[in-house]
Image: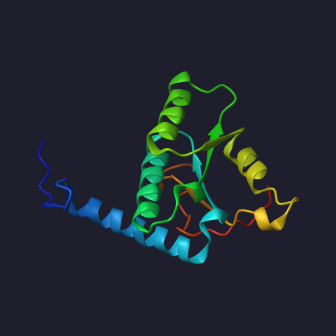
Amino acid sequence: MESTEEVTPVPNGTDYSHSLQAKVAQTDQILRRAFQDFLPERVFLSFNGGKDCTVLLHMVIKFLERKSISLSALHCWYFQPDDPFAEVEEFVIFCENYYSIEIKRVRGTIREALGKICNVEGSQKDAFEACFMGSRRTDPFCSNLDHFQVRRETF
């Protein structure tokens, strides 16, 4: 089945539909605001090797490159389940090598992992203030989230 949506070429030769262009532009605005409101070293990206997180990782890296922000400023955490799939483990290593970044590992559920990462009992100067999470509105507990969601609970 052919799409009836108009496609516009972009400078790198790739064609994007208007709806995808709008989503990319919106994501760019969100990234711009995030890095205006928070220092890059106070932001981390939650990663699980899935499609949504991988797209988000790519978009964050390309944004940082366009803004001449060092990729060493990117904190990326792989939320590693107790019994991970070997293919996901390999893909995480692939992403580290492909993007030349370090992806730190933390075991546990999302809640447990966020608790470990966001635990600020130590030095406040090292505390994270924001997290990028690749999620969809249809994911559990995500239907009412805003792009910038204040954490209302402790972990």
Instruction: Please provide percent x and percent y for residue 49.
Output: 52, 38
Q: Residue furthest right?
A: 121
- Count of marks placed on residues: 0
> What residue is rendered at 15% in x and 58% in y?
5
> What residue is rendered at 46% in x and 55% in y?
61
- Left or right side of 22 for 125: right
Q: Nearer the viewer, residue 79 or 3?
A: 79
Residue 106 vertical placement versus 25 (above, below):
above
- Left or right side of 109 for 84: left
Residue 42 vertical placement versus 13 (above, below):
below
Instruction: Please provide percent x and percent y for residue 122.
Output: 87, 59
Instruction: Please provide percent x and percent y for residue 16.
Output: 21, 57
Q: Residue furthest top?
A: 86
- Left or right side of 13 for 106: right
Q: Nearer the viewer, residue 45 or 134?
A: 45
Q: Looking at the rendering, in which quadrant would you find the C terminus?
A: bottom right
Q: Nearer the viewer, residue 100 or 154?
A: 100
> What residue is rendered at 45% in x and 66% in y?
68
> What residue is rendered at 77% in x and 62% in y?
126
- Left or right side of 71 for 153: right
Q: Looking at the rendering, in which quadrant would you find the N terminus?
A: top left
Residue 135 vertical placement versus 19 (above, below):
above
Instruction: Please provide percent x and percent y for residue 83.
Output: 66, 25
Picture colour scheme: rainbow
